[in-house]
Image: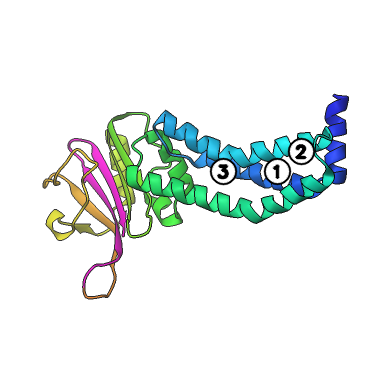
């Protein structure tokens, strides 16, 4: 216990800048830990190590400085290099992560909670904060936008009549559209097209005014009351 106190006291006195770097690295690691959607365990562990690496290196540097294994001069040089390179490293890792997720996507419904937390207020108004306990045949997909690739989100499940009724009441002021009037991406759902049993609600839809829909977005909710099915599809490109 005394050695821990001595370690903290020594570094507060001699390595304040390095402690700040260590704290930044800790926040970077916690951010990665709480925001990763990767499903393959080997890929997840690889990125977890990337997020943890700066924190590990700075902790080792603090220990080596405290033990007098490296000099204060060397510690300060490494600290300066850390400030110059850490920001580029963090940006690079986050870009690599987003690129991987954009290309591979995620189908793990456990990631829905994270997505909902970070969603806009408009999306939170219509997406369920949590999935109902009585749900079946859940299908989920998400991939973020990156460079020229757009963002894709879809969520499908069956539920009970009460949940479906609540959703219909929430959407009663929203305009409905016919399936052929909007190009809905159903790739990650059970359907190739929606039949007439579905009521399709158009939450929003926008296209750029470039003469063709080069950039745009839409948010659609489709409900099959008889089969107790509900489908949410969001595209931004």
**Residue 154 lies in quadrant:** top left
Q: CA distance from mark 3 to mark 1?
A: 14 Å
Q: Which residues are magenta?
A: 212-237
Which numbered disc flags the more N-terminal residue, 3 or 1? 1
Residue located 33% across and 42% down the image? 104
Q: Is residue 204 visible?
A: no
Describe residue 204's horizontal placement relative to residue 43 as left or right. left
Which numbered disc flags the more N-terminal residue, 1 or 2? 1
Q: Position of residue 183 (x, y in %)?
A: 18, 56
Q: Is residue 218 magenta?
A: yes
Image quadrant containing the C terminus: bottom left
Residue 114 or residue 10, whichever sits in front: 10
Label 1 with label 2: CB-CB less than 8 Å: yes
**In front of the other: label 1 or label 2?**
2
Q: Position of residue 207 (x, y in %)?
A: 27, 68
Which numbered disc flags the more N-terminal residue, 3 or 2? 3
Q: Position of residue 188 (x, y in %)?
A: 24, 42
Q: CA distance from mark 3 to mark 2?
A: 22 Å
Residue located 38% across and 50% down the image? 144
Q: Label 2 belongs to which residue?
A: 62
Considering the whole magenta stretch, tell me its main secondary structure. strand
Q: Position of residue 69 (x, y in %)?
A: 81, 34
């Amino acid at each position: 216990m005394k050695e821990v106190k001595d370690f903290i006291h020594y570094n507060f006195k001699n390595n304040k800048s390095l402690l700040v770097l260590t704290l930044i690295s800790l926040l970077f690691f916690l951010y990665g830990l709480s925001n990763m959607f990767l499903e393959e365990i080997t890929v997840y562990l690889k990125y977890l190590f990337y997020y943890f690496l700066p924190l590990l290196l700075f902790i080792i540097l603090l220990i080596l400085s405290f033990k007098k294994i490296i000099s204060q001069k060397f510690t300060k040089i490494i600290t300066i290099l850390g400030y110059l390179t850490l920001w580029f490293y963090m940006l690079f890792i986050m870009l690599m992560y987003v690129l991987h997720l954009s290309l591979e996507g995620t189908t793990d419904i456990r990631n829905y909670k994270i997505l909902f937390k970070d969603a806009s207020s408009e999306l939170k108004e219509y997406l369920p904060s949590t999935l109902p306990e009585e749900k079946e045949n859940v299908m989920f997909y998400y991939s973020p936008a990156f460079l020229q690739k757009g963002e894709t989100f879809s969520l499908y499940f069956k539920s009970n009549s009460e949940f479906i009724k609540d959703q219909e009441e929430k959407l009663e002021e929203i305009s409905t559209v016919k399936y052929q009037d909007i190009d809905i991406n159903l790739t990650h759902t059970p359907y190739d097209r929606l039949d007439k049993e579905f009521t399709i609600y158009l939450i929003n839809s926008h296209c750029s005014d470039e003469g063709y829909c080069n950039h745009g977005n839409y948010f659609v909710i489709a409900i099959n009351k008889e089969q107790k099915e509900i489908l949410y599809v969001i595209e931004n490109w």
